Amino acid sequence: MNFELNKEQQQIKKAAKDFVKGEFKQEVIHDLVKNRTYPSKILKKAGKLGFSGVHFPEEYGGEGLSPFEQMLVAEELTIGHSTVGVCLALSGYGTDILLSHGSERQKQTWIPRVAKADVISSCAFTEPGPVENFEDYHTTAVKDGDSWVINGGKRFVVNGEKNDKPHGGKTGFYIVLCKTDFGTTTPEKGLSTILVEADRQGVSSVNVGNILGTRLLPLTNVDFNTVRVPLENLIGKEHEGHSQVMEFFNHSRVLIASMAVGMAQGAFDRALSHVRQREQFGQKLIEFQVIRHKLSEMITLIETARLITRRAALVCDQGRGDAKSCSMAKFVATQTAIRVTDHALQLLGGYGYMDEYDVEGYYRDAKMLEILEGNNHLQKDIIADTIA
Amino acid sequence: MPGILTENFETFRLEIRHFVEEELDPISVQLEQNAEIPEKIVDRMRELGLFGLSIPKTYGGLGLSTLQEVIIYEEITRTNACHRSRIGTSNGIGSMGILYDGTEQQRQTYLPQIAKGDWTAAFALTEPDAGSDAANISASAVLKDDYWVLNGTKQFITNADTARVFTTLAVTDETKKARGGVTAFIVEQGMPGLVVGTADLKMGLKGSHTHEVIFKDCQVPRENVIGGMKKVGQGFKTAMRVLDKGRLSMGACALGASQKVMELCIKKVQQKIAEGLPKNRTQAIQFDLADMAIEIYGARQMLYHTASLKDSGKNVTSEASMVKVFCTETASRIAERAIDIFGMDGGLTENQVETFFRDVRLYRIYEGTSEIQRIIIAKNLLKK
């Protein structure tokens, strides 16, 4: 049991911190936020420096480190700025499925481009309607000669903006969860993931519109209208889509937890610097006992969330795919992020409510992380399934 | 509550409910995009008398009791909060100083115009270095012949863009400051040296604007001291009394929002159940709804009870603070849970709970943060 980061981990954490310091210029960030522009330039630099492919093997253009280090970087990025950090940390959204299950050719084609941040990657999993049973999956892929023909639509597709505009981000491909077996009755047996290049005919996307948080992240609804892709675009084996996606969510939930820890820390840092400077009633705010206690509570919550998140990240490193640890991390970390960003906003008072002071964005973004990939009721369902 | 809530009032309440449901709610989502209440809606508010809820009938208002007023606030906040904010300063912080401490002449000059909604009233107290610590204001007023010359910067001033009348607090005696050295003035839009800055960019209340208001050698007629020259130096008391009253209104706003959010959630849960969400996955959200109802029920009793006490002439300073804290913190908790119940749909502005989540957050900050309320409550508890 070792709670300290090793030397290499400390170095990468510091490198990420330095990157944030150098590239997250306040005027630039405020401009992006105000105009709702994807941070393409910052992402490009991140790609150049290796922050977009931390845990991808070197043979695919990555840094050859593990998910643990990827998550350390994600935490630093969201400390730097919540919504910009989320965009960078999720630029390779779904690429892990290729890494784990893709063919050599799929990996060679796409992973280096994601690692260099030439493209961002996207997952199209969520059906437009409620999904309780297998028949509720309406996106289908049917074999026709040497092609899959895909029809259907998906909602809340992260990084799903097909065009560079208006919100930017150049999507390379979608991993689409499709119904491929029409004779079976369970998702476990009848779904497959298929790689759909974004420039395929019949793919169209539309931004979900005004949203609570992570507003720079391209979140879209995507339509697949008789989209033809080669049979070889199947990822892994046929009908294994469900288990691939569940495995991916484990990893991804810890990544979200890491970003939540970063948001909590980033909001805390800003609140701390505010209460150190601001005077009311003839003394610095930080001299008030209630405020000191609030800060103590916040930093304790953050430390707790960080520990459970790093432990889950280690589990991911060991490839154990432990749903319980991952859901616990997401549950605790997102709850922490909301509590801490809420306290931080309150510590800034009226300033906390203003865009200019960033913290309001942390509060909104934290809430988005809580509902992304399943709210905490779902995480508790998952945890309960493992212990019941 | 028979006797207090007359049949007439009930008719008025229902009229407001219909106005909210039929005219305000349908434009609420659009309002987030346009960030501007259409003038024809403001005209309807004028017609309904909404700018003069708390102004006595003798000055052209509706003269509602505190209890009646909070009930109307509760009705009108069951939709986008900006609508209430448009009438809020005229009914509250912007006009009450004139009503409480103004001269008869001032009341007759301003209150009927405010009550009609022709003149919007705003309240200029907060400064960059004087937020919670309102006694620390530094805007100054110096008497020169027939004019007071005001200098200083006020910030986060709600409705400054539409306001005709600013109840403005400035220091007239630097040595005494809040203890007899702060004076309340009526400053009118158009007086030389009054500049309203650009609108603040903020998390919520997108259709209600706050601004910096700058006084640069602003000339205010000598007689514009609220209450006349004998009230010079008494302005801080006026300001505190005004804020005291606003706490119940804030509680009412938070309560109306909570009620609406719960209703949106009930619909959503019913829809989920109809769509076949399995029983073993609905119990937690049912409990969420139950908790919302419990907290709303509690909040409403506190609010109505305190408003009634106030109407019977009791001092409710502590109780009003309790109401503000409890109702506004309840609204935040409810909005947080509502987003969870909606899931990713909860993040979409089109589903309204998103807007409530951002908007109700302000209630815990302005017109006295939750922390200031707790200080007031504790001070009164420990008073010997």
Image (tube, coloured by chain):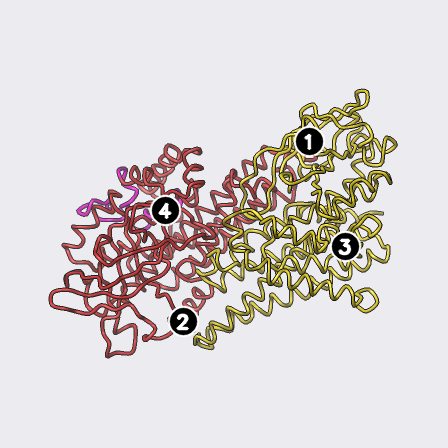
Q: Are marks 1 and 4 in contact (CB under 8 Å)?
A: no
Using the image, tell me which numbered label, if any, was put on residue B190: 1
Q: Which residue is mark 2?
A: A385
Q: Is residue A13 left or right of residue A102?
A: right
Q: Residue at x 86, y 58 (%)?
A: B312
The tint of chain A in the picture is: red
Q: Is residue B213 above or below residue A62?
A: above
The magenta region covers A48-77
Q: Which chain is yellow?
A: B
Q: Chain of mark 4?
A: A
Badge 1 and badge 4 in a common chain:
no
Front label number (2 vs 3): 3
Badge 3 and badge 4 in a common chain:
no
Q: Are marks 2 and 1 in contact (CB under 8 Å)?
A: no
Disc 3 element? helix
Q: Residue furthest left?
A: A145
Q: Chain of mark 1?
A: B
**Distance of label 1 from label 4 (alpha carbons):** 47 Å
Q: Which residue is mark 4?
A: A87
**Distance of label 3 from label 1 (alpha carbons):** 39 Å
Question: Hey, which quadrant is residue A98 in on the image?
Answer: bottom left
Residue B26 shown in magenta: no
Q: Chain of mark 2?
A: A
**Residue A341: x, y in percent?**
52, 48
Question: Hey, which quadrant is residue A318 in on the image?
Answer: bottom left
The three-letter code of the residue at mark 2 reads Asp
The three-letter code of the residue at mark 4 reads Cys
Q: Which residue is mark 3?
A: B319
